[in-house]
Image (cartoon, coloured by chain):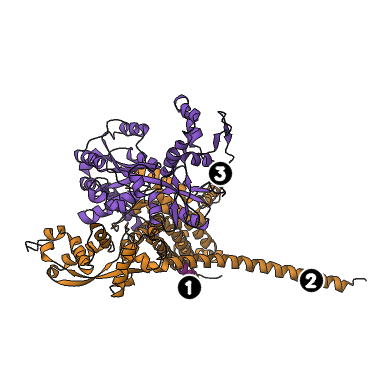
Amino acid sequence: MIRLKHTIPFILSVAVSATVFAAGRDYISIVGSSTVYPFATVVAEQFGRSSGMKTPKVEATGSGGGMKLFCAGVGVEHPDITNSSRRMKASEFKQCQANGVTDIIEVKIGYDGIVLANSKQSPQMSVSRKEIYLALAKQIPDPSGAEKLIPNPHKTWKDVNPSLPANNIAVLGPPPTSGTRDAFVELAMEGGCNKFDWIKTMKKQDKKQYKSICHTVREDGAFIEAGENDNLIVQKLEANPKAFGVFGFSFLDQNADKIHGSLVDNKEPTFENIADGSYPVSRPLYFYVKKAHVSAIPGAKEFLAEFTSDKAWGDEGYLSDKGLIPMPEKERGKFASDVRALSILSSL
Amino acid sequence: MTMTTADKIQANLNKRYAAERRFRSYGLVSVAIGLAALLFLFLSIIGKGYTAFQQTYVKLDVQFDAAIIDPQRTRDPQTLARADYGKLIKKTMRERFPDVKNRRDKRKLYKLISPGAVYMIQDMVRNDPRLIGTTQTVWVPADDDVDMLIKGYINRDEPESARRLKDKEIAWIDSLAATSSLEKRFNKTFFTAGDSREPELAGIWGAVVGSFYTLVVTLVLSFPIGVATAVYLEEFAPTNRWTDLIEVNINNLAAVPSIVFGLLGLSVFLNFMALPRSAPLVGGLVLSLMTLPTVIIASRASLQSVPPSIREGALGMGASQMQMVAHHVLPLAMPGMLTGTIIGMARALGESAPLLMIGMVAFIVNVPEGPLDPSTVLPVQIYLWADTPERAFVERTSAATLVLLAFLVVMNGAAVWLRKRFEQRW
């Protein structure tokens, strides 16, 4: 009972300090994609150590979750920066504008390749995007050539293409909430889907139908949702050499002694092939900054300068050591000067 | 063949004995399965994690060249802070391996040393500017790839293309090892540093401190509120439909998935009360909501176990209801309440799901200095490390799990000890 007497002042003092806090924030708050997280955290740490300012806080909320938090408003209680493994959507831009987040700076930071990899105990595979589509889509065009869909009948890779191994199709991949999944579906599966002319023409007439054909992954056990943890997928590939996994290039890069990436459209997922754009399943990564916060939050300007320096995102910068594929020099220069000038995104 | 009554009884008896033996063996098998699972968990975590308590260090004879650090010899702290200490390390490495000439190889050579070495040297100079101009032997952390090779996690027999370290780099490392300039030492950083993206610089201290603040808030809120609720419900409240309803609800809340409390915290504490994101204060508030039912239920059970004769005796001696509770019942029930609270705290310590919603799943390097600083907690740190690509984080994930398990064992042990030591049997 006596304890209570001490508790009340404690709670009050905490409440008071909480209101004091709301007046300012002395660190940068970053939210967003878990794909960009490994890169943003490295820059944050570098910035914190070399500038002597507080290290920015980086949360991995997913691209969509980050946008929601970012667009909630301007002020210290809202994050300053959101990372995204895709470009901001028009709907999100609108949401931002509606909540007073009008001045947004868009920064592309580089590229990420998405790989289809398997254990080194099995041979490396070479597939086309069309074959990936035929192996993993829920419905595929009738093989007879008629313009109708049938439930995916393929059990083994050999069923898809006789030159592929006669192993059961088993692909471990991220769940639909993941940006990696979005990108894999959009780049690999839709890319393969487009090889059927009648589906391609559908894109203009009935976009919804087109998307459901190209983006729906089969649910009969051939595609296994293995959670967001890419390390876990790598471990599972080791345990099951016949299975394949879908994840970001940095995990292939770190585990090159255990797994190898399949060739897609005859291109191996290597640093060079992703950088020059010849490997087809790669996507740009972004972050977005509130202009109003750049001057209000201490260190924000310096953090942007650090992120866009050649030391960080350059060809031999420390981000490339972590698996980020740098942009060509010209593109880097454009975004770096945009950041310096704080030029805002006018529309999407 | 006729069966006598005695035979029938004997047969029946044998059957019953057999049934009892079977029943016992089921129990034994269940215990064995449980123990085997536990043993497997511990073996796999310890097996993977124990190597993280050591870290490979490299011995460097660093020449604190005044021309690089402080060319004007002003010893001005500003100049010292801005100096390029990386140059000192690069120079030392170049002198150690004079054959390395081309730019690419040099870059690879410098990468054998952790980026943290630069800050180590910087701190040395800041603490003692007299070092400038001298040559010191410094043990600096090696890069995580070197560490992995020394610990045997990188297989030298793999073809060169599949290895993180190429033949050249392995040759350099071997040459360092041959001159005993490479040594595995106790990994102090792991226990004293905050999070880092460089495995060799990453530590759990930030998460431990975050867990501490979170638990303090949880304890300060859930213990008094929980005990007060239990005392009121047990000792003062009339038995009617309302108290029944409250009881059912408390029991229900104890079974609500923890993520729901996180959602509640997000909408009440963050969106409505505008408390800061990622703060241990909010984490503590959410976890108090989660542990309150546990504390209340344990406290009520422990109040119920105090025999009515104590209450009647106190009242008979003329004590008021309040005196009876405060002087007699509460002290006797306290060990049970504390046990329940500690078990609730142990659950709160291991919780990560509700903290996801309130922003405590974040990369935070600075060790929090108060319950309002952004921070993570131990289980979240484990979750974050489990998802990083660097190989060296695998062992650190297991090592952090070991530390968490140690805390849990200590807390649950304390609960058992309290019960054994203070509990009254009636």
Element marked by disc 1: helix
Same-chain status of marks 3 and 2: no
Q: Is residue A1 left or right of residue B240?
A: left
Pair 3/1: label in front: 3
| Closest to the observer, A29 or B89 | B89
Q: Is residue B25 left or right of residue B201?
A: right
Pair 3/2: label in front: 3
- The residue to which callout 1 is attached is B421
Element marked by disc 3: loop
Chain that appears orange: B
| Closest to the observer, A119 or B258 | A119
Marks 3 and 2 sit apart, C-alpha to C-alpha, by 68 Å
User: Hey, which quadrant is residue B195 in on the image?
Assistant: bottom left
- Mark 2 belongs to chain: B
Same-chain status of marks 1 and 2: yes
- The residue to which callout 3 is attached is A162
A199 vs B48: above or below? above
- Residue B213 lies, in percent from the top left, at 34, 58
User: Hey, which quadrant is residue B124 in on the image?
Assistant: bottom left
Q: What secondary structure predominates along the stretch shown in magenta?
A: helix
Q: Which residues are magenta?
A: B412-421
